[in-house]
């Protein structure tokens, strides 16, 4: 009976130690950028940890991505697709870092990855999904004149997954009036997109091209301004007409001002003639008579 109790206690202690060993991986999908390096996170507890007894294995479904045991990398069974592209952070392993670095990511690297860890304190494995995406290039605009309008073509390439396109004219959605062609590169798997619209009865307005790449949060918005020569000529004629009217009004005001000044001066002149000689003339006469009187006394 005592032996059974001891054995049961030992099993409970062992189970308790085992359940305390918990590795940590992302709860949701991880997104990698095409052509760049991607870190696949995985950590484990390091209480009473021993490197020589540590086994780390990364798999994508059934493919071996990277293996580590006997204190070094073991790549004999590594899938050739990952050759010379994977590495562990061995110097950080003592702190519980079992993350995998995957270089030069391709679209074929997408899938479900499993991190498996076994140490002298326990073992566990967990999985999470990896998605690969790529940014679309800066859109390029081409246009050609038509007999009744203009054709606008916008192209962008090197992106993944396939984008969502939208066209606006003065904030009104006109996507259903456009045509879109999507092409996939046979080697890289990346997409090239071309979208065009024929615009007739051109008037001064603006078009907006929008490209959405949801996994990367990439939103490209480019505004295209349209000008009509007819509208511009009408606008120039209206502008000239406004200038002519303004100049005419200014001339009329100047003429009215001159007439007012003329009539005022004429009225003053007429009043002066009615009242006799000006004051300065009177003064001159008085001075002259005084001078004559003074002369008479001297003689």
Image (spheres, grey):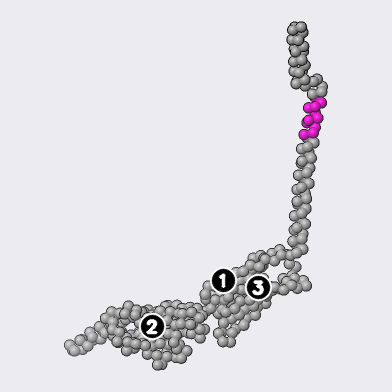
Picture coordinates of residue 145, whole percent (x, y): 74, 72
Can the viewer see residue 61? no
Q: Which residues are magenta?
A: 261-271
Secondary element type, mark 2: strand
In this view, which residue lies farthest toward the left?
A: 2
Q: Decide whether residue 91 is among the magenta residues.
A: no
Image coordinates of residue 289 in percent, x first then y, are 77, 13
Q: Quadrant of residue 8?
A: bottom left
Q: Main secondary structure of the magenta part?
A: helix
Crowding around mark 2 (Cα neighbors within 10 Å: few <14, some 14 to 19, many 20+) is many
C-alpha distance separating marks 2 and 1: 34 Å
Query: Is residue 267 one of those drawn in magenta?
Result: yes
Real-space Cα distance between discs 1 and 3? 17 Å
Residue 161 vertical position relative to residue 172 in the rendered view, above or below: below
Instruction: Point out residue 185 in the picture as x, y percentages from the top left corner.
Output: 59, 84
Location of the C terminus by quadrant is: top right
In the image shown, does 180 or 158 lie closer to the viewer?
A: 158
């Amino acid at each position: 009976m005592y032996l059974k109790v001891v054995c049961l206690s030992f099993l409970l202690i062992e189970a308790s130690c085992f359940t305390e060993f918990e590795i940590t991986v992302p709860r949701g999908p991880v997104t990698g950028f095409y052509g760049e390096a991607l870190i696949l996170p995985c950590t484990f507890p390091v209480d009473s940890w021993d490197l020589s007894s540590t086994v780390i294995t990364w798999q994508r479904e059934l493919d071996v991505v990277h293996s580590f045991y006997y204190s070094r990398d073991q790549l004999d069974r590594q899938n050739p697709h990952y050759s010379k592209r994977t590495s562990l952070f061995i110097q950080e392993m003592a702190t519980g870092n079992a993350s995998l670095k995957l270089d030069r990511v391709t679209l074929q690297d997408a899938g479900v990855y499993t991190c498996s860890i076994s140490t002298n304190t326990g073992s566990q494995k967990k999985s999470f999904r990896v998605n690969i995406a790529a940014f679309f290039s800066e859109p390029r605009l081409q246009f050609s004149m038509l007999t009744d309008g203009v054709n606008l073509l916008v192209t962008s390439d090197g992106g993944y997954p396939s984008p969502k396109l939208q066209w606006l004219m003065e904030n009104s959605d006109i996507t259903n009036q456009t045509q879109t062609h999507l092409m996939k590169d046979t080697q890289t798997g990346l997409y090239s997109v071309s979208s065009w619209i024929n615009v007739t009865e051109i008037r001064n307005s603006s078009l907006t091209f929008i490209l959405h790449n949801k996994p990367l949060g990439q939103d490209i918005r480019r505004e295209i301004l349209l000008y009509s020569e007819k509208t511009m000529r009408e606008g120039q004629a209206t502008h000239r007409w406004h200038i002519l009217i303004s100049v005419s009004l200014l001339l009329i005001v100047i003429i009215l001002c001159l007439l007012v000044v003329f009539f005022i001066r004429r009225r003053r002149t007429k009043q002066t003639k009615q009242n006799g000689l000006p004051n300065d003339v009177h003064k001159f006469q008085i001075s002259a008579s005084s001078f004559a009187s003074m002369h008479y006394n001297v003689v």
